[in-house]
Image (cartoon, helix red, strand yellow):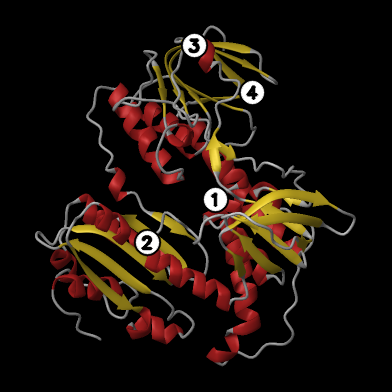
Amino acid sequence: MTDTQYDLVVIGAGPGGYVAAIRAAQLGMKVACVDKRRTLGGTCLNVGCIPSKALLQSSEKFAEAQHSLAEHGVKIGKVGLDLDKMLARKDDVVDGLTKGIAFLFKKNKIDQITGSARITAPDTVEVSDPASVTLKTKKILIATGSESAPLPGVDIDEERIVTSTGALILSKVPEHLVVVGGGYIGLEMGSVWGRLGARITVVEFLDRIVPAMDREVADEMHKALERQGMSFRLGTKVTEAKLSKSGATLTVEPASGGESEPIECDVVLSAIGRRPFTSGLGLEELGVVLDQRGFIKVDGAFQTNVAGVYAIGDVIPGPMLAHKAEDEGVVAVEMMDGQAGHIDYNAIPAVVFTAPEVASVGRTEEQLKDDGIEYNVGKFPFVANSRARASETDTDGFVKILADAKTDQVLGAHIIGPDAGTMIAELALAMEFSASAEDISRTCHAHPTLNEAVKEAALAAWSKPIHI
């Protein structure tokens, strides 16, 4: 392998890295992909997006059996929890998908190399532990992703004070789980363990949860999670976490200053966000420029200031989302191949997989107000949607569409409700093609479907909805 000359070496086998490697191979490049893990898929597949969604699905079924099936006339006996089986199912899902990526690597003749990569020159990657190999290449793509951001005063042991990684493998349901951070990760993992019987307290420094989301949608989500038993301490700062024989004690204070009573719990989940992972890559020695937050600076073709060295995904500015990294990976290698590339960052959807789900694409109402843009708002509640009513338990939430007041072009869309993560794709596509609210409302939607709520919200944005 030391004698192989590569066209591209990708460092990192997460969603951005492995997708870039496959696309590059499809374009005829000789490709190697280096990752510390033996299994492909990165943080997202191994200890992030996929295992968390597997547990969300399992825990939602558990909660449904406990509280909702009777409404549908389904009578069952006492519902029990087999946590070991639930965790094993999660592991099986991950195992199957990682093997699937390995198959795709073999199919596309991509060399998978396990070890730590260090860039020693624009055309050289040194790999060690366990591999020991020097890779010569025409181009290098950094796709090393991100890691959990540390919280001062809180030391992670992944047993009683955990990150999202440790929260996926708790050996028993905690009596009281404190989630530090009211973002996507904390709320999703809090939902999992809350459904399984834990008391959940979310401590958030800001005065609201999911700060990147539209405020109206975030407030509705807050209410829905409170109805499920989740409690919130907003505007609160965690300054220290101390372990005891029985669990942990959090020292907290109001974000504005002062004192508050400490919080006792069994397990603490630190979920205050993530930071780019670039440690050990040799970027400083190579002269690659980073910004003040540690993100790699790139140009419009994803090339760093060092010719031949590129970067995508969580290590560069922008939303830390797997699908954003995938699109960047494809576009980056296509531009290396001389093709045109395009990503509309305003049309990248974001989803929180709680129940109800929350999904968003484009501008929020607050952003439009701050920018002085005149807009129309169209909303439609799921309680007036036939399919949601037939499901009975899926009537929380609404679809909200924001359209330019002068041109009717859709500027943003926000959904809180059943299957929001799937439904948002229609609106992302509409924005990609600069569609108007009228375009969406005049598109025939099958009946009865949840997507009819999208049509009605679009109708409301430019004229009047029919079914409310």
State which tag comes first along the sequence, 3 or 2.
2
Report crowding for label 4: few under 14, some 14 to 19, many 20 or more residues within 10 A (C-alpha).
Answer: many
Distance between mark 3 and mark 1 Cα atoms: 32 Å
- Secondary element at image label 2: loop
State which tag comes first along the sequence, 4 or 3.
4
- Between label 4 and label 3, give the one nearer the viewer: 3
Per the rendering, the mark at residue 49 is 1
- Between label 2 and label 4, give the one nearer the viewer: 2
State which tag comes first along the sequence, 3 or 1.
1
- What residue would you read off at disc 3? 286
- 259 relative to 32 in the view: left or right: right
User: Quarter holding the N terminus?
Assistant: top right
- Between label 1 and label 2, give the one nearer the viewer: 2
Distance between mark 2 and mark 4 Cα atoms: 41 Å
Distance between mark 3 and mark 2 Cα atoms: 41 Å
- Residue type beneath disc 4: Gly
State which tag comes first along the sequence, 4 or 1.
1
